[in-house]
């Protein structure tokens, strides 16, 4: 093998090795950052902020359902996102509660 092609092949091999090492290092850094973010998200989900957010979203959804009984645009919006309104019972004095699609829970 001639010397020039040998040096080019060796240089390319070293470049590939350096890029492989850089890839492993970046993957490790990314994994650590992802683990830290997941821990922070878990703290938020389990903490007061998560509970308040869940209560607030339920209230907002209930209010949207109440408005949908009078506003056809709101009803279309809820239907588009998978929430259907329960049909009101005969003589019922309360507003109908929305029915949640599978996996989504709406409490009255």
Image (cartoon, rainbow, N blue to C red):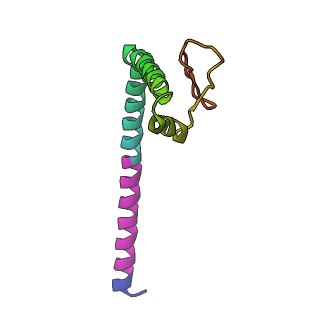
The quarter of the image holding the N terminus is bottom left
Q: Residue at x 38, y 42 (%)?
A: 30
Instruction: List x then y, in percent, for residue 57.
Output: 43, 23
Residue 85 or residue 16, whichever sits in front? 85
Q: Residue furthest bottom?
A: 2
Numbered circles on residues, count: 0
Q: Looking at the picture, does residue 97 appear above or below residue 7?
A: above
Q: Is residue 71 magenta?
A: no
What residue lies at 35% left-to-right and 78% top-to-bottom?
8
Range drawn in magenta:
6-26
Residue 98: quadrant of the picture:
top right
Residue 98 position (above or below residue 17): above
Expressed as whole percent of the image width and height from the top left, the position of residue 46 reads 44, 17
On-image quarter of the C terminus: top right
**Which quadrant of the structure image shows residue 96?**
top right
Q: Residue at x 35, y 66 (%)?
A: 15
Q: Position of residue 100 (x, y in %)?
A: 59, 28
Q: Position of residue 85 (x, y in %)?
A: 58, 29
Would residue 62 be found to the left or right of residue 48 on screen?
right
* Main secondary structure along the magenta-highlighted residues: helix
Q: Nearer the viewer, residue 15 or 105?
A: 105
Residue under the image location 38 percent in, 80 percent down:
6
Residue 11 lies in the magenta-colored region: yes
Extreme residue toward the front, this view: 91
Near-viewer residue (54 or 10) = 54
Q: Is residue 78 above or below residue 106?
A: below
| Residue 90 relative to residue 28: left or right | right
State the image quarter where residue 38 is shown.
top left
């Amino acid at each position: 093998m001639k010397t020039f092609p040998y040096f080019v092949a060796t240089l390319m091999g070293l470049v590939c090795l350096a890029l492989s090492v850089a890839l492993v290092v970046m993957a490790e850094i990314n994994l650590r950052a992802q683990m830290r973010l997941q821990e922070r998200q878990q703290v938020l989900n389990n903490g007061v902020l998560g509970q308040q957010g869940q209560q607030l979203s339920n209230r907002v959804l209930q209010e949207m359902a109440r408005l949908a009984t009078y506003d056809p645009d709101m009803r279309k919006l809820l239907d588009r996102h998978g929430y259907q309104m329960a049909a009101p019972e005969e003589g019922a004095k309360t507003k109908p509660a929305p029915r949640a699609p599978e996996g989504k829970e709406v409490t009255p």
